[in-house]
Image (tube, rainbow, N blue to C red):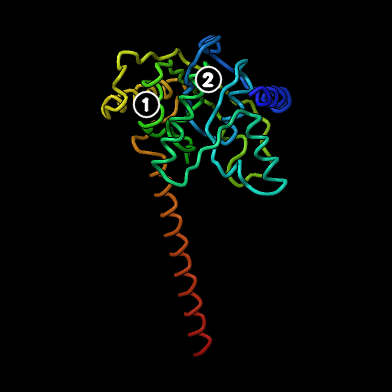
Amino acid sequence: MGGTRLLYGAMKVTVGGSLKLAFRPWVEGLEYIPAEGPAILASNHLSFSDSFFLPAVLDRKVTFIAKAEYFNTPGVKGRLTAAFFKGVGQLPVDRSGARGAGEAAIKSGMEVLERGELFGIYPEGTRSPDGRLYRGKPGGLARVALATGAPVVPVAMIDTEKIQPPGQVMPKLMRPGIRIGKPLDFSRYQGMEHDRFVLRAVTDEVMYEIMKLSGQEYVDMYATAMKRQLAEAAKAEKAAKGDKAAKGDKAEKDRVGT
């Protein structure tokens, strides 16, 4: 544990300091982050960099969940990647099974909070495919909040998706924003973490606060479902272009043959 703290401190100075110097992120609502004790930071998710910008502006350590692949890739590069993610406060979770991944994330979150630390989570479950805010998944966030009694602090990342859009190699130097809201207390639902209607109510309340902070358009569907739709549409478009090209080639061959 001591080694982990030292590594995090070193990364905080190097990575966090570099991000703050290069991008100069603006922050509102830092006073809502508890000075001590456990708390859940529930944020929208626009970019891979969200998990770096938020810890960079906080005095306290915040731990997020990351894919286990980042920690168990073989070779020198794999070891360096694992060390980096551990250093910036990421916890590995095996996502090979949907239910198993969810339970592992919940267990990890509870352990972080039981140590009196900050636990970061993205209720949407994945990055937004188009910059809009999607429906929150009721499992992880709500269950951890109700089981531990930790307050939920809504967080809105602003413009982080514009820094390095998909396909762009070099990041754009611009100022992203972080807007933090008042902590939400769900103690009225204590002992009801297995009631799916309560879990949905808690999640929706958090997502509403994130929407107000971020100003994003809200979409009442899961981001994972939207990503599947977009992937299927892209696949269909590619197939249609292929068919059109094949028909064009055939027509050209028939013309030359005549």
- Residue at (56, 13) in percent of width and height: 30
Q: Is residue 157 left or right of residue 201?
A: right
- Residue at (36, 26) in percent of width and height: 203
Q: Is residue 185 left or right of residue 161?
A: left
- Residue at (43, 46) in percent of width and height: 97
What is the x, y in percent for residue 34? 52, 11
Q: Quadrant of residue 178?
A: top right
First reached walking from the N terminus: tag 1 or tag 2: 2
Callout 1: 10 Å neighbours few (<14), some, many (20+)?
many
Q: Residue flagged by tag 2: what amino acid is it?
A: Leu
Q: Quadrant of the N terminus?
A: top right
In the foreground, 113 or 188 = 113
- Helix, strand or loop at mark 1: helix
Q: Quadrant of residue 88?
A: top right
Residue picked out by circle 2: 118
What is the x, y in percent for residue 157? 53, 26
What is the x, y in percent for residue 256? 53, 86
In the foreground, 146 or 58 = 146
In the foreground, 245 or 194 = 194
In the foreground, 105 or 204 = 105
Residue picked out by circle 1: 143
Observer able to see residue 42: yes
